Image: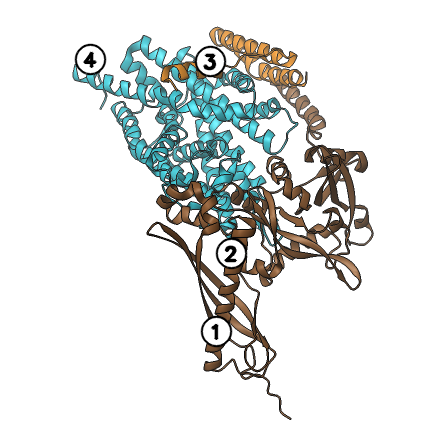
Chain colours: A brown, B orange, C cyan
Amino acid sequence: MNKSFILLFVIIITSTFLLTGCWNYNEVEKLAIVSGVAIDKNEKDNKFELTAEVIDLKSTQVGGRFNSQRIQSDGDTILDAIRNMIKISAKKLYWSHATTFILSENVAKEGILPVLDFIARDKEPRLSINIFVSKEKTAAELLSQQSISTEIRSFEMDYMLLANDSLSKVPEVQVYEFMNDLSNQGISPVLPTLEITLNEGKRTAELGGTAVFKKDKLAGFLTLEDTKFLLFVKDKIKGGLLIVNDKEGESPHVVTLEIFKNKTKIIPNYSNGQLSIDIRTRTDVSIAEEDTTKNYIDEKGRAELRKKAEKYLERNIERVIKQAQQEFDSDIFGFGNTIMRKRPDLWKEIGKQWGSIFPELKINVDADIHIKSSGHILKPIQVGD
Amino acid sequence: MAIIIFYSLFYLTFIFIDLIPIYKNKQRKLFWIYLIMTLFSYTIIILIGVGVRIPSPALIIKDVITSIFQL
Amino acid sequence: MNKEIISTRQYISMIVMFIVGTTFVVGGQHKIKQDAWIAILVALIMSLPLIFIYGRLLRLFPNKNLFDIFEKVFGKVVGKITILIYTFYFFHLGSLVIRNITEFVQVVSFPETPQFFVALFLGILSIYMVKSGTEVLGRWTEFFLPFILFVLMVTILLSGTKFNFSNLQPILYNGWKPVISNAFSIFFFPLGEIVIFTFLFDSLKSKNSAFKIYLLSLVISSAIILIVYIRNILVLGIPNLSQIYFPAYYSVSLINIGEFIQRIEIIISIVFMLSGFAKISVCLLTTSIGVSKLFKLPDYKQICAPISFLMINLSIIIYSSTMEMFEWLEIYEYYALPFQIVLPLIALITARIRIWSGNLKVES
């Protein structure tokens, strides 16, 4: 009895000395915590150039404001470039808190698979990372701009996307959603873009619209306004504004409608060998502002405003869809996917030719807008003498 | 190497806890069965630690099954 | 050897933890795609005749486990051979589970920690558990099962915002054939492995029908698997499911509530380890009982340590890569067929024939 106790005791003591190290022990000081990374490609030597934004732990002792540093490196592949960062930073990069990946146009045009492979395969990056495409010449410059709300640029870009609910001008796409859209039949993925603008004379990053992909390669861009209509079709509108221009009548004026909710139904129609898609949107809005004295609030005015807004929405949705059909040749709305889900037998017949069917697809848009309220003002502000 | 060190401690513990009492209780049959199993597995651990590649029975089973069921 | 008694509830907890055990680690949804939920229900129905066979056998020979039944029905020699075969099956199963857990830990958390190290601790703990006896194992699972259920339910609720119901469509896109073949896979792994519990039935204190107990356990386990599979589909989507090794782990990693509740997937690792450990302990227990019957040893607890050594050994050499571990699943259904269906069925038929011809005396 005694002997086995002693032996057990010895083993326990040795274990406590040996096991506190373990094999994969990571000390916080030895890690460089990455918040985001920009990936460029150097055309001349075909190497990936990475700029990682790393959280600077030195500053935490001073004030409480986090600061970030940027580390650059290059390599033949993305993983190679990441490992090469150790040459400069002396710390191994830790990706578990990264929220943002920014790709340059070149990288996106060549194909996004290398980036996706790293995020999916490596265990540190989360599948909820946001990917952006930079509309500037490089992706790296977006990480060196002045930031507005928080010191760490990558987190700020993450917050920008979170606030997009009220803006609805940019698609919110996390990596796992992107991977789904990429691999799924009948749908092409999109990504939000970033560009640089001047704010108080200083350069800062802002959301810029949509990057449209055909399969895994970049095909083109949509502006902020057009992105809104894209989101309408994809039923991803949670808020935002509809600005209705009224150019007819005595003087041109503008009414702004605030969107409360929107539901979009996509219905495939197949008759006489002809395929067409019906898009029906139902939107609840309120009158948020107008720059005119014309009364849109009484019943007659509301009906008129409603017609104008509906036509505005329908026109623009059709326009954006046409652009996707002709300019990008990419089904970013997921019409094919909807057909596959709702009419699987139909999809089995025509699915293989979707590439040639999509550009010629006939679309009918029917917008239905309900004006629910008009803020605190019952009648527009009258202008007397 | 590390595997041999850790597993040696492991085996040693259980020899103390289990085998010695069995020997003292004069349970001959159990003692021999225990000893043979332990020595056999210890040999395998040493072989693994040294680097010898031991073929996996799973592959054999896999071959047998694929040929029986003509997969 | 003292008779060990466990309550029905403990028995059922053991079965549920066992079946749920490594399902989410290696069960994978790689081929099943969006009709997984249909496949599970079909598999549950398919398992009804199976547990009917088990129930019948156990009812014919009350208070005996399947080891004793085999010896009685097939006679000394053939009976012992059957016991030997099953002992190998459980031994192999135990090593597989050890390997599944150590592989999971290495891929997901510690790439550099060698697997033999994790296996070492799993081995030590399961020896401790088996030496403490069936009762302790029953009480342990009875204690931990609610915890595991709670964690699974909470993680499913927290990922609710990421549900995308269109991921379930189109239903039955590829027709019934893939669903049936997938139902077969689920039938053999994990549902059919309930056969291992017929070897522990003599510890059950009450005289309830084995069929009812097994049915309840299978229904509970299938419900759990079903809910988790559906959650995986709703969150990740079909293309991701066929690419990711451990979908349950990844769906939980996407949970991000208010920047505060995030990266909680580690709790899923813990759940996997707990249920995997229960599974290993049960396998070690039945293997030890089988060995003690073969060598006519008085107490299975004394031999469980060297058996565990050998199980760990096997778990180290059995595969040379993660990919091989997943490829094994494809033939597992054929491998398990004799153990889960054929031998018990032959035993039942033989028993019936021998009783009818007066050869066999049965206590009523």
Which of the two marks, 1 or 3, is nearer to us in this view?
1
Q: Is mark 3 on a helix, strand or loop?
A: helix
How far apart in space, not on screen, are marks 2 and 4 (Cα)?
81 Å
Q: For residue C184, say whether it is visible.
A: yes
Residue B35 located left or right of residue A196: left
Q: From the image, which quarter does the N terminus of chain A lie in?
A: top right
Q: What residue type is labelled 1?
A: Arg
Mark 4: give few (<14), some (14-19) or many (20+) Cα within 10 Å: few
Q: Residue B60 carries which label?
A: 3
Q: Mark 3 lies on which chain?
A: B
Both labels 2 and 4 in a single chain = no
- Name the residue tied to disc 4: C359
Tell me if mark 1 has few (under 14), some (14-19) or many (20+) residues whose alpha carbon lies within 10 angstroms of its own. many
In this rendering, would A100 be left or right of C347? right
| Residue contact at pointers 4 and 1, CB within 8 angstroms | no
Give the image location of residue B35, x and y in percent.
Answer: 54, 9
Along the horizontal axis of the image, is A254 left or right of C73? right
Q: Which of A187 and C248 is in front in this view?
A: A187
Q: In this view, does C185 lie above or below A367?
A: above
Tell me the crowding category of disc 3: few under 14, some 14 to 19, or many 20 or more residues within 10 angstroms, Cα based: few
Q: Which residue position is annotated with label 2?
A: A321
**Residue C133 visible somewhere in the drawing:** no
The CA span between labels 1 and 3 is 74 Å
For label 4, the SS is loop
Image position of A148 with respect to A381: above or below: above
Q: Which residue is drawn at 41% across and 14% down?
A: B64
**Residues at marks 4 and 1, common chain?**
no
Residue marked by disc 1: A306
Please, what is the three-letter code of the amino acid marked with disc 4? Asn
Rounded to the nearest angstrom, the CA distance separating label 3 from label 2 is 58 Å
Between circles 3 and 2, the one closer to the viewer is 2
In terms of depth relative to the viewer, which is nearer, B70 or A295? A295
